[in-house]
Image: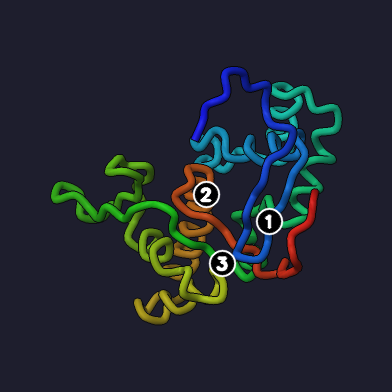
Amino acid sequence: MWTPRRLSGPSYGEVRVNASRLYRLDHSAYMTWLAAFYDPDRHAALTFTREHLAALVRRTIGAHRPFREVDRLLASGLLAELRPDQPWEFLRRYQMFPAADGQGNRPDDLDSFVIGRAGLPGLITDWHVYTIWSTSGTSRNLAEALTHHARDQGLTGNRFERTTAAVASAIPAMVSTRCAYLQDTYHWLPGTAV
């Protein structure tokens, strides 16, 4: 291992999607991809939009065509766009895997469950969101995970709709804090440069 004395910045970045897909992104595309994880609070508030990402990339790295970069990353499956008011297409398309530690609940708040890294809390969720986060990787996609959970818990009607909305709304914060990652089940082709 060595540490370079001077690092001018990488000319490209690599993003591994699964065991068979590795994307080698040019500097602009890689920085755009990294910027998509920025500002977890805005992700949690569901206000981190395509327009916000493009403006952020234009401002921080001087991208000349930020919407082009965002569109390319979306088309490749490296970025995902969720409409919380219409989540089912997203839930059918993506599988989610936990990438942090389930830290359980606290004795003083039995209804809130903590997800974090290295013993530090990152997110506090309700039990349904926590359960989907911890088990969804065993299902073909998030829709299947949510449907199984609803069946097991007897969630129907409004309770099922509220749980679906809570899970969908929590996904951006889980991914932006790197407490979870998504696998695009529609993109199974070998990785290519974007």
Q: What kind of element bears circle 2?
A: helix
Q: CA distance from mark 3 to mark 2?
A: 12 Å
Q: Amino acid at mark 3?
A: Gln
Q: Earlier in the sequence, mark 1 or mark 2?
A: 1
Instruction: Using the image as rendered, state which of residue 43 and residue 166 is in the foreground.
Output: 43
Residue 95's label in the rendered image is 3
Task: Check disc 2 and report the residue beneath it.
Answer: 175
Using residue 26 as the reference point, say whether residue 4 is left or right of it: left
Name which of mark 3 and mark 2 comes first in the sequence. 3
Mark 1 falls on what kind of element? strand
Residue shown at 32% from the left, 61% from the top: 127
- The residue indicated by pointer 1 is 22
Specify few, some or many for label 3: CA neighbours under 10 Å numbering under 14, 14-19, or 20 or more: many
Few, some or many C-alpha atoms within 10 Å of disc 1 (few <14, some 14-19, many ≥20)? some
Q: Position of residue 163 (x, y in %)?
A: 44, 64
**Secondary element at tag 3:** strand
Q: Nearer the viewer, residue 70 or 119?
A: 119
